[in-house]
Image (spheres, helix red, strand yellow):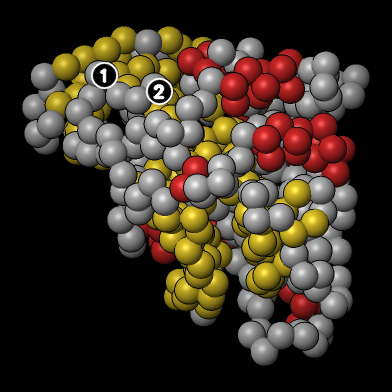
Amino acid sequence: MAVWFSPPVALILSLFLAIVVCSYSYQRPQPRDLVYIPETEDTDGTSPQQVHISLVGTNNMRVSWITNKDAPATVEYGTSPGKYSFSANGNTTSYSYLIYKSGQIHDVVIGPLNPDTVYYYRCSGSSSKEFSFKSPPSDLPIKFVVVGDLGQTGWTQKTLDHIAAVPYDMLLLPGDLSYADYIQSLWDSFGRLVEPLASARPWMVTQGNHDVEKIPLVHSKSFVAYNSRWPMPFSLSSSPSNLFYSFDVASSVHVIMLGSYADYGTDSDQYKWLQSDLAKIDRNKTPWLIALIHAPWYNTNEAHQKEGEDMRQAMETLLYGARVDVVFAGHVHAYERFTGIYNHKMDPRGPVHITIGDGGNKEGLAKNYQDPPPAISLFREGSFGHGRFDVVNATHALWAWHRNDDDVAVIADQVWITSHSSDPTY
């Protein structure tokens, strides 16, 4: 059951937006109230909650969940409901944040798994609930959902409903997950909110500014909740940090998750790792190369202007040299699609940059854009929504942005993207 309440900020934004005259014919929606998902009754404290999965290598899956009390870090799984032919054990951790103490956070890697197969599983031996997921395909086509700055509002719920209504293989999230903003119980609420989707398809995430949660002199360590609750397979790509990593999927797509809030200078661990990671890619075998960041490198919205510029200056040449196809970003609470760009200029050999920080955050929309739009910006709109990136084959992928229009997912922007590796002059 969802509990709704209206914070003062949401009320102020609602009043403000109500008197603003929009410059577009489409009337952008008002912010919606925060959704808090309370914990269900747990008599013995060992029922799994906040279950989510993430890809580990090409044929393994990490299952993460929380229990209130000590419980075995065990996942039993199989290809038929209620029949568990396999089991695996993992690790249990917890963390403290000021006066908050987390539950027992369990983390188990299962596999090897067959591709494109539905598996049924249960956590900690609990019979209270059976979960299921579908493993990604081993070959193209593959369908991604991309959504940033998700949060936990009424619009978040609608975004999740729209995603759940369509077939897809994996969700990519370029930062700002829960918008807990230091209130750790909101991480728990977020975990319960996304569990129906995140337990059924792998969610691959990177961090945003709302995930930092560092308080000088009080809580000096960054990303404690994020790193504890959302471990990603960073070590498999030789990354030293959970804040940046890469992975392969469907034998043809290499995804790079970069950290906008980790050091990225030319002498940093992240820069050196990215340089090494890109050098290993054979585009004849891996025709698609995708990158995710949080703070966009290109942005014609008045919000967060040039906040990604330092990172762009440090790393853009690496991505351009590797002929990255698409760069997805969040942070700006709106949608914008650019043409291929390099060094602020239109360049067909540069990646297409797409900002999709409109999942449903609590702060509302960023609706003010620079006018007139520069030639490199092809479509922009301050509305809530989500994107779908369907990689059809080695040469073509279909991108579509679905606006949340009166609670209905409406395709507002759609374009075919051609991989750089298919260019005969590559």
Residue 271 is situated, as x and y percent measured from the top left of the image, at 74, 22
* Residue 388 visible from this viewpoint: no
- Quadrant of image for the N terminus: bottom left
Q: What residue type is labelled 1?
A: Gly
**Among numbered discs 1 and 2, the one appearing first in the sequence:** 2
- The residue tagged 1 is 111
* Residue 326 visible from this viewpoint: yes
- The residue tagged 2 is 56
Residue 13 is situated, as x and y percent measured from the top left of the image, at 78, 69
Rendered residue at 19%/24% (across/down) = 77
Mark 1 Cα-neighbour bin, 10 Å: few <14, some 14–19, many ≥20: some
In the rendered structure, find residue 403 and report the number of the disc placed on it: none
Can you say whether 8 is above or below 37 in the image?
below
Q: How many labels does the image show?
A: 2
- Quadrant of image for the C terminus: top right
Mark 2 Cα-neighbour bin, 10 Å: few <14, some 14–19, many ≥20: many
